[in-house]
Amino acid sequence: MSRSRFVRCVLRVSVAALLGVELLSCALGSAQDPKGKQPAKQPDFIPAGYDDYQNMLDQLGIKKMRRGRDARVKDTSDEATANPFKDSMPDVLTFKDGTKVNSADHWPKRRAEITEDFEREVYGRIPKNVPKLTWEITKTDEGESGGIATITRTLVGRVDNSGFPQITVNIQASFTVPKNAAGKVPIILQFGFGGGFVPKKPGSNPWTQQALDKSWAYGTINPNSIQPDSSRLREGIIGLTNKGQPRSPEDWGALRAWGWGVSRLIDYFEANPDSGVDPAKVCITGVSRYGKAALVAMAFDTRVAAGFVASSGAGGAKLFRRDFGELLENLAGRGGYHWMCGNFLKYAADEASFGKKTAADLPVDQHELIALCAPRPCFISYGIPEKGDPNWVDAHGSFMAAVLAGPAYRLLGKKDLGTAGDYLTDKMPAVNTLVGGELAWRQHDGGHTNIPNFPAFYEWGGRYISTPGVDKKK
């Protein structure tokens, strides 16, 4: 076997393995961490045998939950039966009292309604008593990449734990700027651990180098250093804020916690102009569960300048009112509930003190989360099933959501996808075709990753986000 063919095989196996973890963790609720290791010992302040999921079911009065789709068996998703709740789809430009939003002046009030529903029923509220955070630069490196002189700073965000010393939260982040920039530059931040979701293909230009070549900065923030990606909700920033006690049904889940971390990094850029980063031009990206987090971060913090939301699936750009791929019931199960607030579990309840609820009872759907990003640029990205971005993430359901979000962008004087506007009949664009304006869509011909769409993102982003440029080293 040739070396290049061997590398391609390794990449395919790596992607499949990573995606398998994503699917099974949500479908099964594994007790292990994403790398397959046994979890660390439970802290002493948590009673032996404590079950966080069951605790929330008890708080809500839920006796029986519906199961989600099983990722281990043959996919049964069928487009012909995928929209059973279409008649209950909320209209992004209709107030809760039934009146219409007919001018941009009305949008702030409608936006507040949508935000309230998402906070109360889907992602949770960030408490007012979250402890303060202090950023510390732990390392500064000067270097060169592609002929461009760079400065890389590694940071730790130390959260004040004086109110509950049993929990320590130190947020890990880093960013690299072109040293000789003519002014403060835009930055693309990625949820991750120092690189892309999958290895780059041999000979390809890394997303980090692409950023520098476009006179952008780049950075990463480690979501697990903010809040564990597991049921350990009495730890991390959520646990520290609650002083080790269980969440209430309206408390934030991991997606909001990860977004909170991005907001604190924007605070750092605002407070430190010598960072070289323009705090008004902070953009966010992530893949899969971190694609969900990227969209949530942008929707709730209007300081995020643009979003690059990749393969985000349910809880991200995909409509909940879809019987296709990953379902609401999957996110409300043991494998995904920690991403959401407790109240979200109600919509997968089969037997409860309040009766039975389904996705049709949700007061919002994900097109409205995309609409919360308006008028800021938002790029929705997916791959194709043949290369490993499976029906589970429901690219079509996310395209539908983007179509439904379009009226909010148009209301605010921006360009949407440019389709006819009927989410049930609009055809998805050809693969590798970028459509839209400030609200954009592109499905690349790769798998469960954002890497193939980075060139399109930088080209598209350059239409809306300016950069002062840099002087390359001779």
Image: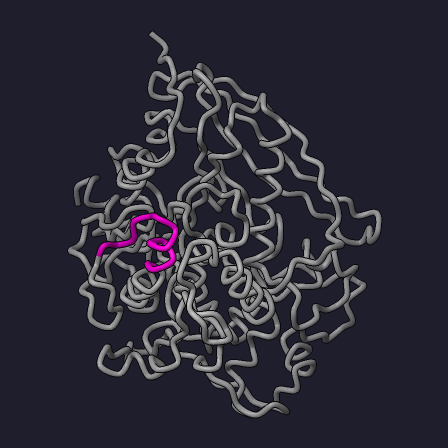
Residue 337, picture quadrant: bottom right
Could you say which is closer to the camera, residue 11 or residue 367? Answer: 367
Q: How many marks?
A: 0
Could you say which is closer to the camera, residue 229 or residue 341? Answer: 341
The residue drawn where x is 30% and y is 79% is: 83
Q: Position of residue 417 (x, y in %)?
A: 26, 54
Q: Position of residue 316 (x, y in %)?
A: 43, 61
Q: Is residue 307 magenta?
A: no
Q: Position of residue 136 (x, y in %)?
A: 68, 31
The residue drawn where x is 29% and y is 68% is: 391
The residue drawn where x is 74% and y is 48% is: 168
Side of 413 relative to 174 (left or right): left
Q: Position of residue 314 (x, y in %)?
A: 41, 67
Q: Quadrant of the C terminus?
A: top left
Question: In the rendered image of this protein, does residue 150 appear above or below residue 56?
Answer: above
Residue 119, picture quadrant: bottom right
Question: In the rendered image of this protein, does residue 280 appear above or below residue 345?
Answer: above
Could you say which is closer to the camera, residue 180 or residue 136? Answer: 180
Q: Quadrant of the N terminus?
A: top left
Side of 308 relative to 261 (left or right): left
The residue drawn where x is 56% and y is 77% is: 345
User: What are the residue bounds of the magenta stretch?
Assistant: 406-418
Q: Is residue 408 magenta?
A: yes
Side of 219 relative to 416 (left or right): right
Question: Which colour assignment does the render follow?
Answer: one colour
